[in-house]
Image: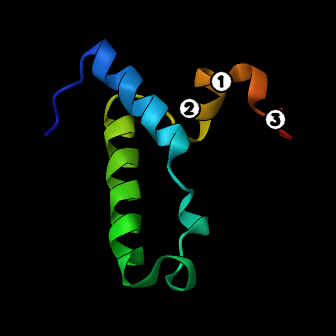
Amino acid sequence: MSEKMSAEALEALKIAFTYMPKAIEVNRYDHGDDYQRILDDIEQVREMLLLNDVDPEEVAGEIRPDSTPNSCY
C-alpha cells in the first residue's frame, strides 16, 4: 500500500498517533501477551506516516504545538 492518503485521513491518523503509547512504554509486564501485537500496530502506523512524508517524532508538535515541550536539539 504505497498510495498517499487523503489530507483528511492523514490528519486523523496523526491525531490517533498522538494518543498511542510510545513503543518504549509497551512491555509484557503492563500489556501481557498483547505487547508484541501493540508494538506491531505502533510500527504499522509509523510506517504509514513515513510513507506520507510525515516524521512520526514531529507529529505531536504539529498537532498540539501548545502542549508539546520544546526540542532540546
- Using the numbered discs, state the Cα–Cα distance from disc 1 to disc 2 in whole angstroms: 8 Å
Q: Amino acid at mark 2?
A: Val
In the picture provided, is 52 more to the left or to the right than 21? left
Give the residue pinned by disc 3: 69
Q: What is the crowding at mark 1: few (fewer than 14 residues within 10 Å), some, or many (at least 20)?
A: few
N-terminal label among 1 and 2:
2
The percent position of residue 16, horizontal first and vertical second, equals: 44, 37
Query: Residue at 57% of width from left, 57% of height from top?
Result: 22
At label 1, the amino acid type is: Arg
Q: Quadrant of the N terminus?
A: top left
Residue 64: which disc?
A: 1
Q: Is residue 58 found left or right of 70 in the rendered image?
A: left
What residue does disc 2 label?
A: 59
Along the viewing direction, whichever of 25 and 59 lies nearer the viewer? 25
Q: Residue at x 31, y 40 (%)?
A: 48
Q: Residues within 10 Å of mark 3 (few under 14, many from 20)?
A: few
Q: Which mark is residue 32?
A: none
Quarter holding residue 21: bottom right
Q: Could you say where residue 67 lies in the image, as x and y percent from the top left?
A: 76, 28
Neighbour class for label 2 at 10 Å: few (<14), some, many (≥20)?
A: some
Nearer to us of marks 1 and 2 is 1
> Which SS class for mark 2?
helix
Amino acid type for the residue under numbered disc 3: Pro
Q: Is residue 32 above or below residue 40?
A: below
Give me the residue at 22% from left, 24% from top.
4
> Would you say the residues marked 1 and 3 are in contact, meaning their CB atoms lie under 8 Å apart?
no
The residues tagged by marks 1 and 3 sit, at their Cα atoms, a distance apart of 10 Å
Residue 69 drawn at (x, y percent): 81, 35
Hey, which quadrant is residue 64 in on the image? Answer: top right
Total numbered circles: 3
Q: Earlier in the sequence, mark 3 or mark 2?
A: 2
Residue at 86% across, 41% down = 72
